[in-house]
Image (spheres, coloured by chain):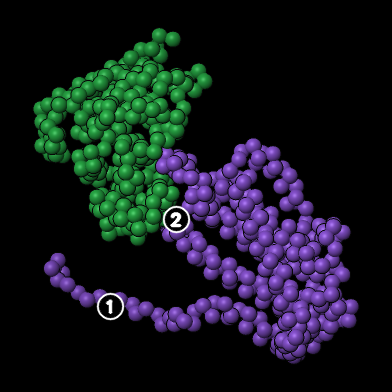
């Protein structure tokens, strides 16, 4: 075959792929659907009072939660959760920036922080009840004080790790402190701050339930106590379903925020690998 | 206005027992392009950081425009060697150029300044890109644009082209000459590259090995119009280059001599 000769080589046809709009729902829901189907089959063949059929759980879910309970239990719980998360982010960031920027403050406080982080957050609930009573203030305080640690410690680390050349650059341009904080320190620490926030979200959800298990008049955590006492298994499963959904919604919201805030970071990492 | 802009007088820097800089003295006139050349590890960066007000000297003084430098000077802009770390990866090219201007001027003024500065370095098209989307040479252009937009009296550059390839380096050298001529700014350019120091400089300050002293202060009597091909082919260029090379070899030998004496 001469060099000048050209041949058309048939490239293998790309396999028919899942259309784009369907890919995400498939990724998300394929596995849960399989589980529900298997569970339904198993519970149809061997009924078990501890593991009610998904249909029963679904019905109970609708009966228990899709009514005025939205306003009397779910929304108050979510409100306290949201407020607790916001407070933990604000306080964690503020303290983290403060401690992270000062070497002596860091050395002074880090052992104490490590100690408090090591204390399981539910242990502080009885103490906070004594100090703050059993109302909303206590519940929000439980969520905020427990969820604060991952954010605080990650922020300290992130602020401390701002690049030396970046520091010298902004110093040489005499950038004032506020500009430094907003345009250099916080963005530079943002990958670590986001890691801290992600950890805090799951802690916050756990604490939301726990804070409602002690003498409370409403809320999701109270309901599970009632169901336990009354052996209402389907209702308990419906509650687990509800909490799982809250967790998923939190995770999705977080991912959307992270996608936006850390777009530069993904690009940078991609460029470094290339 | 006094003709001398920058005066470095008997500057010493010690780190414990280690004497990094010894009695460094030189001056730069307003609008001059001075290169500081010296062997690797001779304390060039230390000297530059002291001049930039980022580091304090053990003794001696730096004066800029008649006032002693105790911190970063408002009329001085620095271009660092590590362009990748000197630019903020979370900001676009324009954001980076405008960052030092934020406290000083309105958004409209900043936009005009950054546009002009980016066009001056040939990056008018790239203002919405992120630094990590650009090549090393282009990133260093962004850093130069940021320094120009700051509107400095003196531009201090610390081995800015040490990490880019030869072709890009030649382009960037010409860019520095061009910026210097067009803006009439004083430039202090630190390098370890002898050819580069002669090609760029109107004057070359040769440093020795540590403890670093000023080995020689040399006027580069080459034509003002520089060209990568013709200037570097001039007999005078070769003479100057040989001369500086010998000076640096002597400096190195002197350093070895001193070590042997111990």
Which element type, helix, strand or loop, lies under badge 1? loop
Q: Along the horizontal axis of the image, is B256 left or right of B35?
A: right
Compared with residue A173, is residue A135 higher up or lower down, i.e. above or below? below
Compared with residue B42, is residue A50 higher up or lower down, i.e. above or below? below
Chain ID for purple: A
Instruction: Tell me the subunit letter for badge 1.
Output: A
Instruction: Tell me the subunit letter for badge 2.
Output: B
Q: Along the horizontal axis of the image, is B19 left or right of A116?
A: left
Compared with residue A56, is residue B132 higher up or lower down, i.e. above or below? above
**Residue at 19% of width from left, 33% of height from top?**
B199
Query: Which residue lies under the disc numbered 1?
Result: A10
Q: Position of residue B87 (x, y in %)?
A: 40, 48
- Quarter of the image for the N terminus of chain A: give it: bottom left
What is the residue that sits farthest to the right in this orientation? Answer: A229
C-alpha distance separating marks 1 and 2: 44 Å
**Which numbered tag is attached to residue B39?**
none
- Residue A87 in sight: yes
């Amino acid at each position: 075959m001469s060099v000048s000769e050209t041949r058309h080589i048939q490239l293998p046809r790309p396999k028919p792929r899942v259309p784009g709009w369907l890919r995400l729902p498939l990724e998300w829901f394929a596995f849960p659907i399989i589980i529900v189907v298997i569970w339904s089959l198993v519970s149809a063949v061997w009924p078990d009072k501890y593991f009610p059929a998904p249909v029963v759980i679904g019905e109970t879910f609708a009966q228990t939660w899709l009514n005025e309970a939205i306003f009397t239990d779910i929304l108050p719980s979510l409100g306290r959760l949201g407020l607790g998360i916001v407070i933990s982010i604000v306080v964690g960031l503020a303290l983290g920036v403060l401690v992270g920027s000062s070497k002596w403050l860091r050395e002074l406080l880090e052992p104490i922080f490590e100690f408090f982080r090591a204390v399981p957050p539910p242990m502080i609930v009885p103490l906070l009840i004594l100090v703050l009573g059993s109302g909303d203030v206590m519940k929000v305080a439980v969520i905020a004080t427990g969820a604060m640690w991952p954010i605080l410690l990650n922020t300290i680390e992130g602020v401390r790790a701002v690049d030396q050349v970046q520091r010298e650059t902004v110093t040489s341009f005499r950038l004032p402190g506020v500009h430094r904080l907003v345009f250099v320190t916080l963005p530079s620490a943002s990958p670590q701050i986001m890691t801290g926030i992600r950890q805090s979200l799951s802690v916050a959800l756990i604490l939301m339930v726990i804070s409602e298990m002690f003498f409370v008049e409403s809320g999701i955590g109270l309901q599970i106590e009632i169901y336990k006492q009354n052996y209402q298994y389907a209702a308990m499963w419906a509650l687990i379903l509800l909490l799982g959904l809250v967790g998923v919604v939190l995770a999705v919201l977080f991912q959307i925020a992270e996608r936006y805030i850390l777009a530069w970071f993904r690009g940078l990492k991609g460029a470094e690998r290339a | 206005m006094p003709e001398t802009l920058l005066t470095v007088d008997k500057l010493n820097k010690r780190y414990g027992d280690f004497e990094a800089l010894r009695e460094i003295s030189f001056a730069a006139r307003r609008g001059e392009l001075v290169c500081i050349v010296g062997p690797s590890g001779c304390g060039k960066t230390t000297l530059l950081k002291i001049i930039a007000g980022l580091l304090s000297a053990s003794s001696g003084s730096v004066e800029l425009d008649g006032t002693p430098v105790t911190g970063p000077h408002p009329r001085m802009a620095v271009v660092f060697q590590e362009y990748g770390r000197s630019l903020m990866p979370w900001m676009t090219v324009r954001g980076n150029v405008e960052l030092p201007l934020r406290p000083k001027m309105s958004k409209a003024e900043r936009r005009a300044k950054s546009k002009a500065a980016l066009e001056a370095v040939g990056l008018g098209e790239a203002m919405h890109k992120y630094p990590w989307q650009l090549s090393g040479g282009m990133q260093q252009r962004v850093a130069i644009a940021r320094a120009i937009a700051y509107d400095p009296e003196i531009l201090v550059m610390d081995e800015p082209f040490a990490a880019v390839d030869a072709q890009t380096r030649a382009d960037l050298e010409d860019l520095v000459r061009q910026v210097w001529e067009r803006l009439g700014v004083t430039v202090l350019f630190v390098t370890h590259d002898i050819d580069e120091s002669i090609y760029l400089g109107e004057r070359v300050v040769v440093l020795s090995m540590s403890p670093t002293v000023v080995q020689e202060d040399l006027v580069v009597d080459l034509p003002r119009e520089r060209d990568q091909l013709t200037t570097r082919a001039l007999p005078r260029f070769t003479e100057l280059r040989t001369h500086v090379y010998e000076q640096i070899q002597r400096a190195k030998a002197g350093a070895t001599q001193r070590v042997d004496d111990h």
